[in-house]
Image: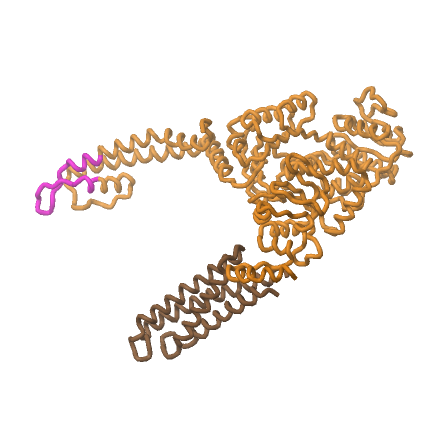
Amino acid sequence: MATTSELDRVSMVVLRYMRGPVFVLIAVYAIGITGMALIPGRDVDGNVIYMNLFHSFYFFTSTATTTGFGEIPIEFSDEQRLWTILCVYMGVIAWLYAIGSILRLVQNPHFLLALREHRFAGRVRRIQHPFFIICGFGDTGSLLARGLSDHWLRGVIIDTDPERIKALALRDYRVDMPGLCADPTVPKHLLDAGVVMPNCKGVVILTVDDEINDRIAVMARLLNPDIHILCRSTSKRHIEHLRSLGRVTIINPFEIFAQLLSMAITAPRLHNLNSSLVHNPHVRLGKPVDIPTGDWIICGYGRMGKWLYRHFVMNGIKPVIIDPEASEIEGAARIINRHADRESLIEAGLSHAAGVVAGTDNDHVNLSILMCVKSLKPDAFTIVRQNQHEHQIAFDATNANLILQSSLTTARRVLKHLISPQVEKFIDYLREQGEDICEQFVLRLQDMIGDKPPHLWHNVINDDEAAALNAYLHNGNSLTLEQLTRDPHNLETTIACIPLTIRRNGQCLMLPSAGEPIMAGDDILFCGSQQGEVMLSASMNNVYTLDYLISGRDKARGYLFRWLEKRHQPVSSQT
Amino acid sequence: MNLERVVFGFVIILALTFTFAFVMGDIDNASHHNVWLLTIAILINLIATGLKLGDRSQVGALLLASSLVVDVLLITARVIWVIDENQTALGPNPESMANIVSLAGGALLASIVTVVILVGDTLISRR
């Protein structure tokens, strides 16, 4: 590879740094050993003898390292002792110099940084499975990493904040998640994170700065023209620019937020299903929230307030807005240019309001609005925006009807995309079909998994994920979804899974019927229980289980019984 | 019920019991160990190995591997017996007898592993 990464840099630095000390050591050794071999000694009879080179090397090694085994092999002459004194000082000084250099190198912060990057790049290179790069490990990033780990998906994390990366090391993820404290706008770091590796399936960019997100997206696109990029962006200018890069999914937290609210108003059942699919702990499947239409009050008209307002108006509700800085807004019932407090809420008509949105970007303000509403009008429907993930417990205690947390909704949306882009398509499809179809589906799902949270997964019918099934289909056989999802314990029932979509040749088939034949290469999205995934995977990968599902009989396994079976085949096929 | 499972289970457990019958007794006393038992155990095990040929499942591969281990150990024991048969009037002398029986003991262990795998597979099996 032409582009150099950290992998080869560290060894280069060490070698270059150690060049001086190594030369000094070699020179000192050479002088000491040569001298020792040339200086005459005397044996017990007084004859002149010389040390051979090996003995002098041995002697010098033990002396220079201050070990010193004494005068061996024979007691030294005075000349030799003189030279030994010189050897000791030379050798010890040379060694101190060398060790000192190593210590200085090890303490050098730049070297430590290079070493960390080296280790990080090494860890990423060793990832065998598909993984995603996550740039930005704030609230959203860490929630996303948790979600990925729950689905056994791998992530590689880059963040500029060293504290966050240190915290990453303490998380108990199910999979290995290497983290690097570095600037993700620098291409070298993206390369280290494996942006050009074939098993890198996407780059998720989640820092709070739109400008930086934009820069990272451009870098990632330049380095890998095919990679899927998911980028958080809230400003119109950047969104338009990002769209021009191609294969970019834009994540606008405020829009997602407002879409969810809109969904909760117009399609409560779908909202309920969507929330339970993303494992929202406050939601129980089949128990949708009922948002009243009537007079609404929106506190806070910032970026999020604008989106909420737009969706309210789309749904035929004209809310009153309380915001100190909001100016002329088209279609608003009334605008109150004050901070949201007890008086302004009463002025906005809280006594006859159906609901209140506490949507400022300050959690303490939102909480106090909630307290106010609870004391003045306890039966009002409350929707609250939670900005900081760490305030979770306080918000849980308020008993608000709907808590919308920007980082959480964003992380869930991204996670849905990463599990399979088909999830979002399926939700859109259900939205078009209307509430009745959605309710039927929810009942079917509840029937299958009971009160457990639904689990989403997808399988591609190929040699890696469905070996037996793929081989079966390649032999010219055909199989329907109903046959595949039969329960091997009891062929009359099915495994706890519902096929949601099938993607085939770029086309998406929604809620396929039970009789739908499966083709090789299909990408099928399932919803069901965790156990259902395990069972289905066993059915698709074990030849004998698959065969039993189709024929209802156990196939002979060994050669002998297969031969016997073949001999009896004509008889059994007639019966 | 599946005829193949019955036959294979029968053969594999029979092989285990024959091996056990041979191993029973003092380790170096030739009169405690019947060479016929050893020979029959080898034969039955070879049949078990043959029955597992062609199974493409993971458990099948493991069963085949462990029964191959049994074959190797028992045949080695039998070969030593043939070589040292005439050392004493009863058969091999105590040293080679100890070798033969400890090899058969190893085979017994592998046989137990095979049976455990078979039972486990049947228990967690779907039906």
Question: Residue A552's quadrant in the figure?
Answer: bottom right
Question: Residue A203's quadrant in the figure?
Answer: top right
Q: Is residue A132 left or right of residue A53?
A: right
Quarter of the N terminus of chain B within the rendering: bottom right
Q: Is residue A279 left or right of residue A94?
A: right
Does A35 lie within the magenta span? yes
Magenta-tinted stretch: A32-56
The answer to whether residue B8 is seen in the rendering is yes
Q: What is the display colour for chain B?
A: brown
* Residue A527 spot, x, y in % from top left: 69, 45
Q: Nearer the viewer, residue A315 or B115?
A: B115
Q: Nearer the viewer, residue B16 or A139?
A: B16
Quarter of the C terminus of chain B within the rendering: bottom right
Q: Is residue A21 above or below residue B125?
A: above
Residue at (16%, 41%) from the top-left corner? A51
Q: What is the display colour for chain A?
A: orange
Does A545 lie within the magenta span? no
